Image: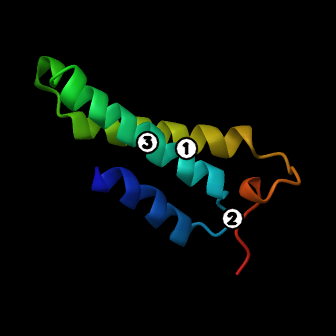
Amino acid sequence: MGTTVVLPLIIGVLKKDVKPISGLLSILAGGLATAIGEWGLHNPNEVPSLLVGIRCNQLAFWASEMIFAKPINNPLLQPVQE
């Protein structure tokens, strides 16, 4: 589960205009996919659930970055200012 948190954190540090909602959604999607793959499906076809979680994590991250690209006045949808 740590990898599903580490990747959005690394991207958020390296790419300065990341929206907080993208990180939150990607962590939730990656964690949920990992949990379902591990405990619900018991690693079908011997595919590690961590790989599924990372893939879902990145898909959710970049999809939310594209969906919320238009400026909105909600603080969760704004890039973090330093």
Q: CA distance from mark 2 to mark 3?
A: 18 Å
- What residue occupies the far left of the structure in this picture? 46
- On the image, the x and y values in percent for residue 3 come to 31, 54
Name the colouring of the figure: rainbow
| Mark with earlier residue (2, 1) | 2
Residue at (29, 36) in percent of width and height:
34
Relative image position of residue 16 (x, y in whole percent): 64, 70
Q: Secondary structure at mark 2?
A: loop
Residue at (70% x, 69% y) in the render:
80
- What residue appears at the point 29 percent right and 27 percent down from the top-left corner? 36
Q: Is residue 56 above or below residue 62?
A: above
> What percent of the width, then of the height, locates residue 4?
36, 50
Q: Which mark is residue 25?
A: 1
Q: Could you say whether the residue bearing mark 1 is in a helix, strand or loop?
A: helix
Q: Is residue 55 visible?
A: no
Decide: few, some or many residues near mark 1? Use Cα within 10 Å; few <14, some 14-19, many ≥20: some
Side of 9 relative to 52 (left or right): right
- In the rendering, at what x and y percent does residue 81 appear? 74, 75
What is the spatial separation of the Cα atoms under label 2 and label 1, in whole angstroms? Answer: 16 Å
Lower sequence index among marks 3 and 1: 1
Q: State the residue at coordinates (13%, 18%).
A: 45
- Reading the image, the residue beneath label 3 is 57
Which of the labelled discs sits on residue 17, or is there none?
A: 2
Question: Looking at the picture, does residue 55 appear above or below residue 39?
Answer: below
